[in-house]
């Protein structure tokens, strides 16, 4: 009997949302794209100029996002819709990757003395910290959730089995 999506799928929808947003920002920040396509990326680039200068770290990070985390995020989303047994393992892998990438993203800019960030409150606090900070909080919550479910599954697997009479 086919199963419908589990109620948690709304929360897990952050997987395709995160990756499609990152890919959109990377492609629309390109200076040679038509004006209407490049406006969101150019606006965000005011908060982090690394997107307009083809900074090596940013290009590498966004490439991993587009080619690894993007497809894995979509696979994770599908796994939750189908209630696949590996769904929490995938959630853990993708969330760890996202959290690691965001920590590196903030850490490299902090080590550079915030030189690529516009100090005006809108650009620094709303765009740079706020928009990226969400993707520290969400993966951290999903890591905790995956650990809870994986621990419960392992506990159930390790518990002594009752003999049927």
Image (tube, helix red, strand yellow):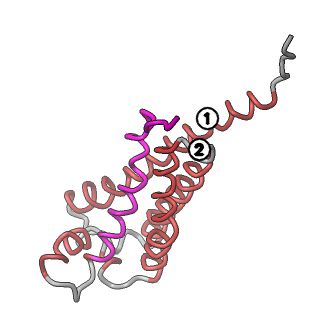
Between 123 and 163, the residue placed more toward the observer is 163
Q: Are marks 2 and 1 in contact (CB under 8 Å)?
A: yes
Q: Position of residue 122 (x, y in %)?
A: 19, 58
**Residue 74: where, in percent of width, then height?**
45, 58
Which residue: 35% across, 55% down?
17
Vertical arrangement, residue 108 with respect to residue 81, above or below: below
Looking at the image, which is closer to me, 82 or 66?
82
Q: Main secondary structure of the magenta part?
A: helix
Residue identified by numbered label 1: 149
* Residue at the (47%, 51%) spot, across then down: 78
The residue tagged with tag 1: helix, strand or loop? helix
The C terminus, quarter of image:
top right
Q: Residue 1 location in percent, x, y? A: 52, 35
Q: Position of residue 54 (x, y in %)?
A: 37, 84
Query: Could you give the CA–CA distance between mark 2 and mark 1, rounded to whole angstroms?
Result: 7 Å
Residue visible at 48% across and 65% down in the picture: 71
Residue at the bottom extreme of this rendering: 32
Image check: 8 left or right of 146? left
Residue drawn at x 33%, y 77% is 51
Q: Earlier in the sequence, mark 2 or mark 1?
A: 2
Q: Which residues are magenta?
A: 1-27
Q: Which residue is mark 2?
A: 88
- Above or below, 36 against 105 in this view is below
136 falls in the magenta region: no
Left or right of residue 122, residue 129 in this image: right
- Report crowding for label 2: few under 14, some 14 to 19, many 20 or more residues within 10 A (C-alpha): many
Res. 68 mark? none
Give the quadrant of residue 40: bottom left
């Amino acid at each position: 009997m086919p199963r419908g999506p589990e109620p948690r799928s709304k929360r897990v929808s952050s997987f395709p949302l995160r990756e499609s947003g990152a890919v959109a920002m990377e492609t629309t920040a390109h200076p040679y794209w038509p004006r209407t396509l490049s406006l969101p990326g150019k606006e965000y680039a005011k908060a982090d100029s690394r997107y307009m200068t083809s900074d090596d770290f940013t290009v590498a990070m966004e490439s991993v996002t587009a080619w690894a985390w993007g497809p894995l995020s979509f696979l994770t989303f599908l796994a939750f819709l189908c209630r696949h047994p590996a769904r929490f393992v995938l959630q853990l892998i993708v969330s760890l990757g996202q959290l690691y990438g965001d920590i590196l993203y903030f850490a490299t800019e902090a080590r550079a003395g915030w030189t690529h960030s516009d100090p005006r409150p809108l650009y620094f606090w709303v765009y740079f910290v706020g928009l990226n900070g969400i993707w520290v909080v969400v993966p951290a919550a999903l890591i905790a959730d995956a650990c809870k479910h994986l621990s419960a599954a392992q506990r159930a697997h390790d518990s002594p089995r009752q003999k049927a009479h």
